[in-house]
Amino acid sequence: MSNSEIALTIVVAALSGASASMLTLVYNSAQEQRDRHREHFSRALQTVSQYEEFPYVVRRRRASDPEGERIRISTELRAVQAELSYHCTWLMTESPQVGAAYDALIGDLRCIVGSLVHEAWLGSPVDDDAGMNIADIGPEIEKLRPLKEQYLLEVGDHLSLWPRWLRHAARWRGERSASRS
């Protein structure tokens, strides 16, 4: 084997190794970004769940300290509302489709849950064990399910390795097949 063949072999091996390293680096970077997004999308939905709890929190407030409870609950509520606004803004900058789905969810969330919180403040605090069962709030919050599902669908599209248009086409085709049955 000549010196030029040995040099060519070394160069090819070095380029192959560098290419493999570069591909691994790009893949790992994309995976880390997807993981960060997944975590943030999850926290955004967790904040929605925290907000949904406030009608229960207000109803179950301690009657023995009305002023303290107003301050405590309003402080907690303010923090959750700030988180909702933060997630709305971040999601809009990250993905217009995910942001729009979250914004729609938050709009209805504030309307439905806000009304429930308002009604809870007008009522008396729960003063016995039987009052801890609050059946009228759940069905109202359940109205948010389609918007949560749409948000999760958009999150799935955003995180997918497949292009958005391909996922939409597959869903459309599946829906068409299901409607024919």
Image (cartoon, helix red, strand yellow):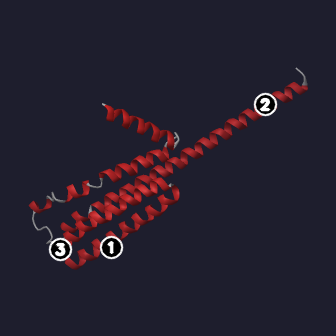
Q: Is residue 47 left or right of residue 34?
A: left
Residue 23: x %, y % from top left: 65, 39
Could you tell me which quadrant the C terminus lies in?
Answer: top left
Q: CA distance from mark 3 to mark 1?
A: 18 Å
Q: Is residue 176 above or below residue 154?
A: above
Given contact means CB atoms under 8 Å apart, are the residues at marks 3 and 1 in contact?
no
Residue at the (9%, 60%) spot, across then down: 130
Residue at the (38%, 59%) spot, across then down: 104
Of residues 65 and 57, the one drawn nearer to the viewer in this rendering: 57
Callout 2 secondary element: helix
Is residue 60 visible from the viewing direction of this image? no
Residue that numbered label 3 is attached to = 122
Could you tell me which quadrant the N terminus lies in?
Answer: top right
Amino acid at circle 3: Leu
Residue that numbered label 2 is attached to = 12
Residue 171: x %, y % from top left: 41, 39
Amino acid at circle 2: Val
